[in-house]
Amino acid sequence: MTALVTGATGLVGHSIAAALRRRGTDVRALVRTPGKPLPEGCEEVQGDLRDAASLRDAAEGCELVFHAAGLPEQWLPDAGTFREVNVEGTRAMLAAARAAGAERFVFTSTIDVFEADAAGVLEESRLDPNPKGTAYERSKQEADALVAAAQAGGLDAVFLHPAAVYGPGPAGSPGINELMRKLRDGEVPAIPPGGMPVVFSEDVGEGHVRAAERANAGDRFILCDRYVDNRALASAVLAALGRERVPPSLPLWLSRALASASEAVSRLTGKPPLVAKGQLHFLQWQPRPDASRARAALDLEFTPLEEGIARTLAFLEA
């Protein structure tokens, strides 16, 4: 059996490819830029979500398609790029999977598509019917809806909804890995307010592959270890490094002012803001995803945060 993995040079796609290779599955890794590290034994194929022909070529002969590629950023100079890549790229990937006669389409969605009040519980049965507040979130909602429509039309598709992913994977992974590196190097002057649900990268890869193996068509699975507030996360990382002093917390009002100012500067420079409004919005949402379905149906045990931090720091030091 051959599996196509899109986004294989990203943290999620890399973890999926590694989980497949542990099983001896032939993996075709779709990459935009050749030569980046991939799990051993992967076949590298060059392509782009904005190039439908490259996707058709990549999917040809693949029984499984894992679509993990996309833009995870909360800010881009042109917000329309989110739709171009996350929505239209998914549409093109669905068409390529159908043309190849793929037996199953495994889609990396996000917890952002679910509905919950601030600090509320997220469950797979509660998709948010309303457009979310950021271009990134709306693009993921649209992409999720495309896959759901394809599944209703006969495509065998399953959905995975990871929390914020961290852990060993490609160098330069953004998000929590980057935060951990900056904490290690003393580059975090203050801790933003709020927090986030987290999940270890190896568990995300394993969850995707077990869903491909065991799930029913249309099934959805939240992948999450726990919610952690930002200060507790920073404290745990620094404790693992043998340090006690945690940077001061940044007040919410100051964080909002900083986000507005830094995005204004970014519109002029084209460089990412120091703090994006969308990122701050997510940190203030503070949802508590319920991953009991993945634990039960996929027999998935999530790596505890303290262990995950230790393994990630060891990886970052290597």
Image (spheres, rainbow, N blue to C red):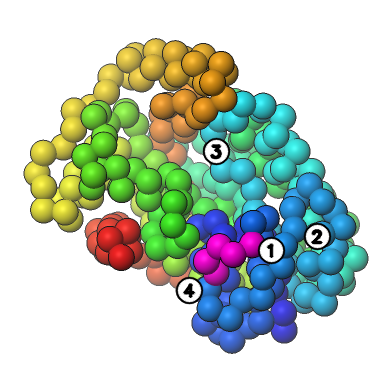
Alpha-carbon span between mark 3 and mark 2: 23 Å
Q: Are marks 2 and 4 in contact (CB under 8 Å)?
A: no
Q: Does 217 appear above or below 224? A: below
- The residue to which callout 2 is attached is 55
Residue type indicated by callout 2: Leu
Give the residues in magenta. 34-38
Q: Earlier in the sequence, mark 1 or mark 3?
A: 1
Residue occupying the point 30% across, 48% down: 180
Q: Earlier in the sequence, mark 2 or mark 4?
A: 2
Distance from disc 4 to disc 1, alpha carbons, whole Å, reads 29 Å
Who comes first in sequence, dot 2 or dot 1?
1
- Give the residue at mark 1: 30
Q: Earlier in the sequence, mark 4 or mark 1?
A: 1
Cβ atoms under marks 2 and 1 closer than 8 Å: yes
- The disc at residue 73 is 3
**What residue is rendered at 42% in x and 26% in y?**
275
Magenta span includes 213: no
Mark 2 vs mark 4: in front: 2
- Kind of residue sitting beneath label 3: Glu
